[in-house]
């Protein structure tokens, strides 16, 4: 049976821990200029319904470093963008390439694609989940502070795809997630309920971040929500991660943001550009964690 990565829960706990340790090894190989062309002549198809900087560059670079190839596919230059059924595109592409990455809107679309694909499919972002980013975030925390097990993580802001993936990560990596969102922007209740006591919710960002080991946020209006910007600015006004909020967290707490960021909105410049911020390591780690993921999935075949 083909192994896909549509949410973090497609990994078991052992696979997840091993993947993070393997990412550390692969990162060291890059730093030491050690060749690791493990997948020569292997091809990754990258399907983008949503634009991206970090996702495209990290996956494409990953395949180059592995000695393979990556093909960029946008709706403008594929039959997917002209209405070809997802099932047909999945059947055709998976006969020609070794692995497929999709960045799209509806999560159901990637589930259907995976159902008809003969090769592994990676969720590089849907409206419901962003699991690849979480692999990078966990890797970054482990590099800076060691195991994340049992730690207090504060999610401040929209109950969006990143928040949903943090909920799944709490289950997978055994940390305590404290979510603070304004009314009307809570995370999906089913996803939160499934996590049990790994997750707690409040409408008070100060309460969520109190004595936290890590504070995380995201933009107030995600891709496709720009028309709601002004409404969201009012709702999220008290949910900015600033120095006052970080002062309530542990003195050595880290700050993360998946980027791109809007300084002065969801995070102050003082925090994102300050000493507790590890956002640049976090961004780089998309490359290394996704290489470990690619290796896991390609070897599973």
Image (cartoon, rainbow, N blue to C red):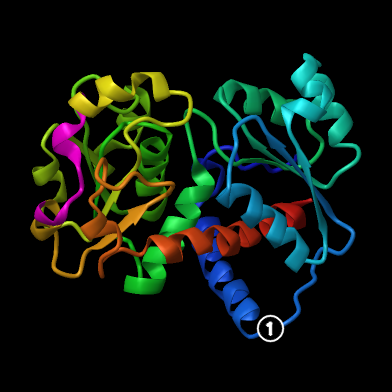
Q: Position of residue 140 (x, y in %)?
A: 42, 65
Q: Is residue 108 above or below residue 159?
A: above
Picture quadrant of residue 137? bottom left
Q: Position of residue 40 (x, y in %)?
A: 87, 64
Q: Magenta stretch? A: 235-244
Few, some or many C-alpha atoms within 10 Å of disc 1 (few <14, some 14-19, many ≥20)? few
Residue at (15% x, 45% y) in the render: 208
Q: Is residue 106 above or below residue 261?
A: above
Residue at (41% x, 39% y) in the render: 162
Q: Residue furthest bottom?
A: 32
Relative depth, front residue between 52 and 122 = 52
Residue 171 in view of the camera: yes
Relative depth, front residue between 118 and 234 = 234
Decide if residue 212 is on the left or right side of residue 278. left
Q: Position of residue 200 (x, y in %)?
A: 20, 38
Picture quadrant of residue 163? top left
Decide if residue 239 is on the left or right side of residue 187. left
Q: Position of residue 145 (x, y in %)?
A: 32, 72
Q: Where is the N terminus found, in terms of image quarters?
A: top right
Residue 214 in view of the camera: no
Relative depth, front residue between 245 and 171 = 245
Residue 276 covered by magenta stretch: no
Judged by its main secondary structure, the magenta piece is: helix
- The residue indicated by pointer 1 is 33
Decide if residue 280 is on the left or right side of residue 64. left
Q: How many marks?
A: 1
Residue at (32% x, 61% y) in the render: 149
Q: Is residue 189 above or below residue 164?
A: above
């Amino acid at each position: 049976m083909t192994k896909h990565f549509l949410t973090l829960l497609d990994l078991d706990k052992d696979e997840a821990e091993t993947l993070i340790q393997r990412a550390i090894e692969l990162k060291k190989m890059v730093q030491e200029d050690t060749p690791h062309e493990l997948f020569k002549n292997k091809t990754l198809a990258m399907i983008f319904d949503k634009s991206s900087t970090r996702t495209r560059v990290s996956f494409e670079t990953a395949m180059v470093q592995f000695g393979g190839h990556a093909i960029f596919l946008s709706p403008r230059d594929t039959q997917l963008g002209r209405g070809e059924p997802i099932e047909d595109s999945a059947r055709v592409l998976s006969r020609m390439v070794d692995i497929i990455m999709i960045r799209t809107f509806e999560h159901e679309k990637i589930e259907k694609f995976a159902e008809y694909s003969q090769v592994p499919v990676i969720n590089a972002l849907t409206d419901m989940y962003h699991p690849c980013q979480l692999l990078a975030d966990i890797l970054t925390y482990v590099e800076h502070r060691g195991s994340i097990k049992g730690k207090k993580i504060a999610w401040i802001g929209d109950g969006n795809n990143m928040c949903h993936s943090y909920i799944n990560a709490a289950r997978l990596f055994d940390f305590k997630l404290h979510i603070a969102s304004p009314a009307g922007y809570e995370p999906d209740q089913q996803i939160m309920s499934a996590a049990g006591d790994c997750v707690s919710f409040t409408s008070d960002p100060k309460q969520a971040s109190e004595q936290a080991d890590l504070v995380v946020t995201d933009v107030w209006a995600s891709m496709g929500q720009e028309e709601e910007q002004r409404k969201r600015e009012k709702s999220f006004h008290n949910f900015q991660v600033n120095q006052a909020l970080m002062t309530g967290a542990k003195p050595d707490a880290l700050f993360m943001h998946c980027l791109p960021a809007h300084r002065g909105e969801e995070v102050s410049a003082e925090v994102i550009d300050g000493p507790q911020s590890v956002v640049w390591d976090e961004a780089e780690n998309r490359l290394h964690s996704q290489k470990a993921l690619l290796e896991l999935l390609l070897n599973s075949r």
